[in-house]
Amino acid sequence: AIQTEPSQTEPDHQVKDFSPRPISPETFTARGKDLMDNNKPTEAIDQFTKALALDYGYIQALKYRIHAYKMLGLTDLAKKDQTLLTSL
């Protein structure tokens, strides 16, 4: 018999992950920098934080996050990151 409907046990189709860039601190930092260039410091902080979650000592992400915090007037967070930066 010819099957006209998809089987319940088989997925309808597989979607491959075609990420344009690998997940890395550099990737998240580049995304964050693009967001900063588009005046979106809040969203940029999220990307820099993700970069730092992958590599806690990634200096570029830390420097950009400090700048983003300062743009938003979050001086306490900027000072905390500055302290971390000087300890690296």
Image: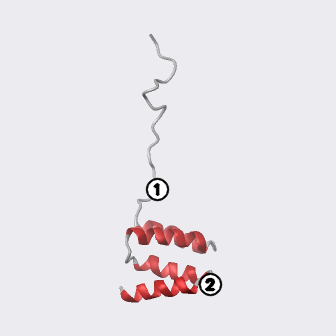
Classify residue 40 by image quadrant: bottom right
- What residue is shown with label 1? 20
Image point (56%, 79%), residue name: 68
Mark 1 / mark 2, whichever is N-terminal: 1
Q: Are marks 1 and 2 in contact (CB under 8 Å)?
A: no
At a point 44% along the width and 69% down the height, the residue shown is: 51
Label number found at residue 68: none
Q: Which residue lies under the disc numbered 2?
A: 73
Could you tell me residue 81's position as x and y percent? 47, 83
Q: Residues within 10 Å of mark 2 (few under 14, many from 20)?
A: few
Residue farthest along the top direction in this orientation: 1
Label 1 residue SS: loop
User: Which residue type carries mark 2?
Assistant: Gly
10 Å crowding of disc 1: few (<14), some (14-19), many (20+): few
In the image, residue 82 sits, relative to residue 25, either above or below, namely below
Q: Residue at coordinates 50% horizontally, 79% vertically from top-left?
A: 64
| In the foreground, 10 or 32 | 10
Q: Which amino acid does label 1 sit on?
A: Pro
Calculate the distance from the C-alpha at mark 1 to the C-alpha at mark 2: 33 Å
Q: Is residue 22 left or right of residue 72?
A: left
Quarter containing the C terminus: bottom left
